[in-house]
Amino acid sequence: MALRLVQVNFKARDDSALGRFWAEALGWGVSSEGPGVTNVEPVDFVWPDPVAVCIDVVTVPDPETVKYRTHLDLATTSAAHQAELVARLQELGATPADIGQGDVPWTVLADPEGNVFCVLEPRSIYQDTGPIAAVVVNCADPRAMARFWSEAMDWTLHEVNDDYARLRSAKGVGPYLEFLRTPDVNTVRHRVHLDLKPYSGDDQAAEVARLRALGATDADVGQGDVPWMCLADTEGNEFCVLTPG
């Protein structure tokens, strides 16, 4: 039994507008599985595939703009590429964001709904990830999070210390999942979350039971009667276990 990270879920006031922003930002396409949902994924992408972690944007009646625990880091290949990407993103509606980062080589922006993300300076580790270098989760204890998530998924733990942990698909493709030690993380909200998917033939209920044994707890986010299961990890970060496939 195993799970894989297949998408990052953004709650939004306008799924279509925010989905278009991220599609333009990443050079990907958009589709929709139903009203109020916009799927952002590479053109001609056959889902799921570890080569990319996709984006799912869902409209919810929550207009608040606050700092969230999970954000995206975007990869660049050169200083010129970084500058060009930042300029293009601002033309698309992104705005500079100050989260106390100080003088750093990466650029911090917010998308049109206030979700903060980073455009990284060129780093060799991210040269083959695709446009998303990493999905970053702020946390209190990266070591504990690494233990939970490396057992929850079939991803490989690449590095862990007191300040951060880094995992990646066992196939060595796509973006990294990173856990970053952050002060006052418990005051940060959960508007962005991760979606995991069992492999075809695996049992969703058995996977959920396994996650509970690892320390996950049931989460009620107002989902109602849906085919996926909502859980929270050991630090309270909500995530969903989708149906197998």
Image (cartoon, rainbow, N blue to C red):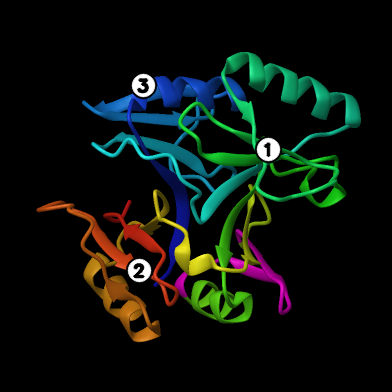
Q: Secondary structure at mark 3?
A: helix
The one of 216 and 46 positioned closer to us in this rendering:
216
Please identify the residue farthest to the bottom as the structure is shown.
213
Q: Residues within 10 Å of mark 1 (few under 14, many from 20)?
A: some
Q: Is residue 36 left or right of residue 129?
A: left
Q: Is residue 150 magenta?
A: no
SS of the residue under disc 1? loop
| Relative image position of residue 140 (x, y in whole percent) | 57, 74
The residues colored magenta run 152-169
Q: Earlier in the sequence, mark 1 or mark 3?
A: 3
Residue drawn at point x = 76 percent, y = 43 percent: 128
Is residue 55 or residue 173 the one in the foreground? Answer: 55
| Residue assigned mark 3 | 16
- Residue 230 placed where, x, y %? 27, 61
Q: Amino acid under label 1?
A: Gly
Query: Disc number at residue 232?
Result: 2
The residue to which callout 1 is attached is: 130
Q: Which mark is residue 194?
A: none
